[in-house]
Image (cartoon, rainbow, N blue to C red):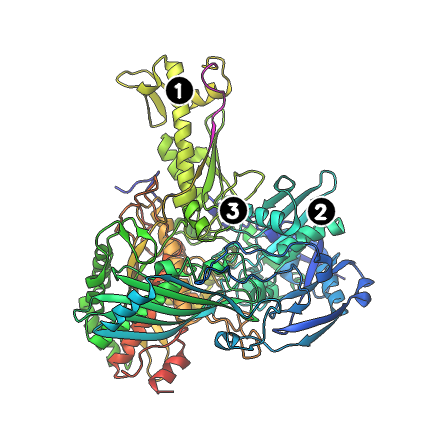
Amino acid sequence: MPKDHGIGASPKRREDVRFLTGAGNYTDDINVHGQAYVHFLRSDMAHGKINSIDTSAAEGMPGVVKIFTGADFEGVGGIPCGWQVTDKHGEPMQEPAHPVLAQGKVRHVGDPYAAVVADSLEEARNAAEAIVADIDELDPVVDMGKALEDGATKVHDDLNNNLCYDWQFGTDTETTDKAFAEAAHVTTLELVNQRLVANPMEPRVAVGDYSRANDEHTLYTTSQNPHVIRLLMGAFVLGIPEHKLRVVAPDVGGGFGTKIFHYAEEAFCTFAAKACNRPVKWTSSRSEAFMSDAHGRDHVTTIELALDKDNNFLAVRTDTKANMGAYLSTFASSVPTWLHGTLMAGNYKTPAVQVNVKAVFTTTVPVDAYRGAGRPEATFQLERVIDKAARELNVDPIALRRQNFVTQFPYATPVAVEYDTGDYDATMNKMEELMDIPGFAARRAASEASGKLRGLGINCFIEACGIAPSNLVGQLGARAGLYDAATVRVNATGSISVMVGAHSHGQGHETVFPQVVAEMLGIDESMVEIVHGDTSKIPFGMGTYGSRSLAVCGSAMVRATEKIINKAKKIAGHLLEASESDIELKDGQFSVAGTDKSVAWGDVTLAAYVPHNYPLEDIEPGLEETAFYDPANFTYPAGAYACEVEVDPDTGKVTIEKFVSADDFGNVVNPMIVEGQVHGGIAQGIGQALLENCAYDENGQLLSASYMDYAMPRADDLPHMDNYMVDHSCQTPCTHNPLGVKGCGEAGAIGSPPTVVNAVIDALHSGGHTHVSHIDMPVSPSRVWSAINGQ
Amino acid sequence: MTNVTMTVNGKSVSGEVKGNTLLSDFLREDLRLTGTHVGCDTSQCGACVVHVNGEAVKSCTMFAAEADGADVGTIEGQANADGSLNVIQQAFQDHHGLQCGFCTPGMVMSAAALLKENPNPTETEIRDYLEGNICRCTGYHNIVKAIMAASGQAVPAVAAE
């Protein structure tokens, strides 16, 4: 009998009712009395020298409140980067200034260089037309290889060159070279992990407000982590102490990483609200989002895999160029390094793994974390090269993977992380069962009978979630701690508010977190409410990204609830005239062990707040506890994915015919939500594999700046229900957090791109197109057709 | 400025609008019906779908003045008279057909229009019909399932351990 409440149940989401009735409260739904609107002038060229910006004609135009340029932000801090990477020579990365509005140069299409605040958006736009910007076009810096050549045009004139850092990690060069020299077989693959745009359906919005009465600032913003924004913007950009700055992230319409970062528009609206003495609102258009939201991925890699004569993996070596774009976004520098290099061992016991990454500045939109952040890039390289090796060696790709799996845990990889637990054979077994691999030959024959090529793609992945612990990431260059926090406030009549640092922007925390607290206390879930998204209400937590909410913030919530239980038992012991050590809590009743004496949850909570009969000499009144939780390690979800595609050899069109995921997320609190997360991740991964591409031309013009040009996955691009299974029944609980959970938000986006590409290559080989060893994503009809036809 | 009068969710409303005021802006800013969302500027995403005289319309692509005299339905008017979720809304909740909720109003309004013209759609027909509605969270799987369920077709229930 499936559970109907508590951990493991799938109650209906409580947030759904407001979203389904139009009662959600997204940032653009917030209008502050008297607000003005800002329109940003953004560079239409990739690279230019600003000679002058003449705002005189615009200043007198109707409705104009104030016009800002970079000069207004001299003396104000720039947008900071939250992670300092140290290069292979021990030198810190090159870190350019990132002004709120461009100063001296514009460095990408979309770089804001002026802003008009006016009574209405239309008036702001009209006035912007009257601003004369004298900007000399400079040579664009688009291709990463050319950007690194001697004498290349520099994106930042005050830096030595366009190299942010040259990073090396893992096994030393001598050992790695020796492994390759002794290998029986080496497979090499060059590939591109293309630039993507996260595209949450809600564009970014910021509303700045300032109260002269008490010198307090409020920023309403579309953020995954309001406390992080408050700290970064307050301390590093605008010099506002935390107690004078409130950041509110209300209902947020999806994030996928791109709403982690602190953006110039947030700082602008906060700054301008004081400067104009009026609230200032900015709502991004979708076109603006394409040229100002941090992009994702954009790695170019050569990977080599060395195998011995028995097909055991001996070594992996990678050489990657990672595009940073024009400036360092908040966590940009950490993505190709610590979130990517540490995953290059994958699910395999390869003894030598060396990762080399050059991060490069170009005149493009900054690149930062997007769903998976470094881990999809790692998985794509490794699983593609393994697939290619299997084909070259004529061995079964499943058998080759199984042979090299890590099977003993804990396992310390050559790339610094220690996997605490896992069972990669179990997820592979489950995938094989659900995929009906023995039936593939018949399905392939059926496809061939209708003139199509059918391919089967296999993939494994591991990821590191719940990034931690703080003392380790600090050594690696993080400029923040990576704990989270929760306050459990029990009210007098027994209802509970839980204030959490995590932020829900689709993940369903308002439903899931109460399942945990209610189960621990044995009370009804409806008595527990989650409060999030407002720095004036919640403890200092780090927000939601990297599949960390339940593993990190959920653990803080468990710890705080344990403190509540301990104190409540003391109170119950007093009420029952028994020792607290004899008190048991079950189904919301405190009882004295071995007796029929008990008091209800509500009796104890009332006593805490109406302490007439209360041990005031021993404990304080009230029942409210906070816990901060800093995990001992990452969590390591893993899984095995499979996909069958059909390729039309006449057109190159690829369709997904069948898709199976078998994930190990450890313990699962709400299976419905876990499956929903995997569905979403897989859709984004299939989008990357087949459709999406953020394209620049050689002049640095952004070609894909609307949904007319950037191919988002639609309902008819994804597999039908009967041929689509997401499974999470293989569960090896995380060994170091109290819930045993690992995180599920990114798995689908990590596991699916190589699965699809592996299947396409398999299909082409089955049709005799054996010269095709790789096609870069998106595997579009034209790319497949060109590959088939040798063009 | 033009005076427009229309029926929105069964109530007569009127307002002064400019010739270039979009229906989506009139609904959101003048009537404060903020359930209609704007997710793009090229009529692609479908978050702004409303009903105009019974037809699904992208309200970012229609001037408010064009809706003068029309019968307009938005997400705020979809629930049953007693305030409970209607069949489609309930199916979206039952089958986890929404996550962040931003595309949801448009999805529900499109689904209602689909089921009006095709009360028993196949999965393929649903997927084709949703061509003009983009969701970034759900991968569409549970949205398709919810619409099938709302049409009375049997679909698998949500998982529980």
Disc 3 is placed on an element classified as helix
Q: Where residue A565 sits: x, y (%)? A: 39, 27
Closer to us: A422 or A743: A422
Q: Where residue A626 sits: x, y (%)? A: 47, 33
Residue A33 numbered tag: 2
Mark 3 lies on residue = A18
The structure residue drawn at horizontal position 71% and vertical position 57%, both measured from the top left corner, is A74
User: Residue under mark 3: which chain is it in?
Assistant: A
Q: Where residue A314 sits: x, y (%)? A: 24, 66
Instruction: Give the vertical position of A652 relative to A197 (above or below).
Output: below
Q: Where is the N terminus of chain A found, in terms of image quarters?
A: top left
Q: Is residue A274 left or right of residue A630?
A: right
Mark-to-mark CA distance, 3 and 1:
39 Å
Q: Where residue A561 sits: x, y (%)? A: 41, 32
Instruction: Single out the mark in the foreground, 3 or 1.
Output: 1
The structure residue drawn at horizontal position 25% and vertical position 51%, both measured from the top left corner, is A730
User: Amino acid under label 3?
Assistant: Arg
Please identify the residue farthest to the right as the structure is shown: A60
* Number of residues whose C-alpha sits closer than 10 Å to that of mark 3, classed few (under 14), some (14–19) or many (20 or more): some
* Number of residues whose C-alpha sits closer than 10 Å to that of mark 1, classed few (under 14), some (14–19) or many (20 or more): many
Instruction: Give the vertical position of A448 relative to A402 (above or below).
Output: below
**Is residue A136 among the parts visible in the rendering?**
yes
User: Amino acid under label 1?
Assistant: Lys
Stretch in magenta:
A617-626
Mark 1 lies on residue = A570
- Is the C-beta separation of discs 2 and 3 under 8 Å? no
Closer to us: A91 or A321: A91
- Is the C-beta separation of discs 1 and 2 under 8 Å? no
Instruction: Give the vertical position of A328 relative to A673 (above or below).
Output: below
